[in-house]
Amino acid sequence: GKMVEICRSNMAIVSVGLISPVRLRKRHTQKHRPDAENAQDQRVKDGGDEDYAEALELLCEYARWLTAFPIAVKHFLRQDNRKGWSNDVRYKKRRFEIGPLLTDEDARNVVMKYDDKDGKPTSDSKMGILARAPPLVVLNRLHEYAYDIAHHTYIHDSDSFAPTPQGRAIFYQQMTDHLNTLYGSFGAMERIKGTPLPFAYAIHLRTFLLLFLFLWNMVSVARYGGVSLPFLFLLNWALLGIEAAAVECERPFDYNPNHLTLGKVSVVIARNIGQALKEVVR
């Protein structure tokens, strides 16, 4: 939920902060000089259109990487060794999920966590060494684009519509605050993934539970006979179900139906980012 919230608000802030100076200048030009009576007015209009195209291109690049972030998080949190998946099959499936958001070279760095002996990305954990965490690759690239967006130079950077240095600093601070929150969200999920129940605790709990149920069943059948079997079945099912639920909650990011639907989270974020872009280009 936190990741969806931050991605949504971050995209809204970035799109408004980057496009608003161009939009304000364009509205001012259309209102006060609608017919572009002289060459200077025409240059103002042309410069506004060029500003808009450059800003929109930079915004779309940022949006593509922001959309790829929850996908990279999902791939990182879920196990690589899924039954029936070879390294090539896993890469093709994950590359398909990213789709046209990233180029093939960028997608390899996001999907493949390992590097071979030549330093090239690979999906084979046996032939390579762990070289990167894909979500961090995406966040680092977003930080680069955040700096470029905050310091974007407009053609008419000297007029009253261009952001002031103080405004650029505040804008950059807002973007980095959101990205740092995404770092924290990813770190929290990484800690959940990497912190299973202690082995001794799990063994002790299961041994005690099975011993308790075995003795309870033996005593109940000896004392009450077969009439106690339905009640014993319900009791066993309830207590073993609680233990099984604890095992499922221990690693909530896998592929089982009871685990978190990280794919739906990625879809929601992609739709929210797409909506923000539509509002910009309307």
Image (tube, rainbow, N blue to C red):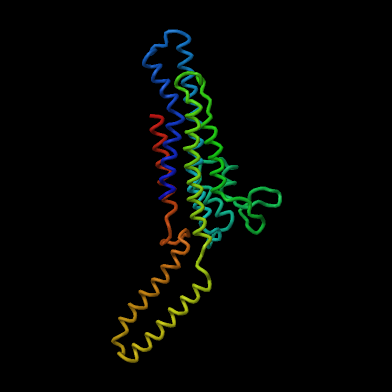
Q: Quadrant of the C terminus?
A: top left
Q: As drawn, is 228 to the left or to the right of 8? A: left
Q: Depth check: 240 or 176 in front?
A: 176
Q: Residue furthest top?
A: 38
Q: Is residue 253 left or right of residue 132?
A: left
Question: Looking at the picture, does residue 121 appear above or below residue 245?
Answer: above
Q: Residue at x 46, y 75 (%)?
A: 205
Seen from this angle, which residue lies furthest right?
118
Q: Position of residue 238 (x, y in %)?
A: 35, 74
Quarter assignment of residue 10:
top left
Q: Residue at x 49, y 22 (%)?
A: 50
Instruction: Name the outermost residue toward the front.
Output: 166
Towards the viewer: 174 or 194: 174
Image vertical order of residue 202 relative to residue 188, above or below: below
Q: Residue at x 49, y 29 (%)?
A: 166
In x, y percent, where is residue 34? 38, 13
Q: Residue furthest left?
A: 227
Q: Position of residue 114 (x, y in %)?
A: 63, 52
Q: Position of residue 68 (x, y in %)?
A: 50, 44
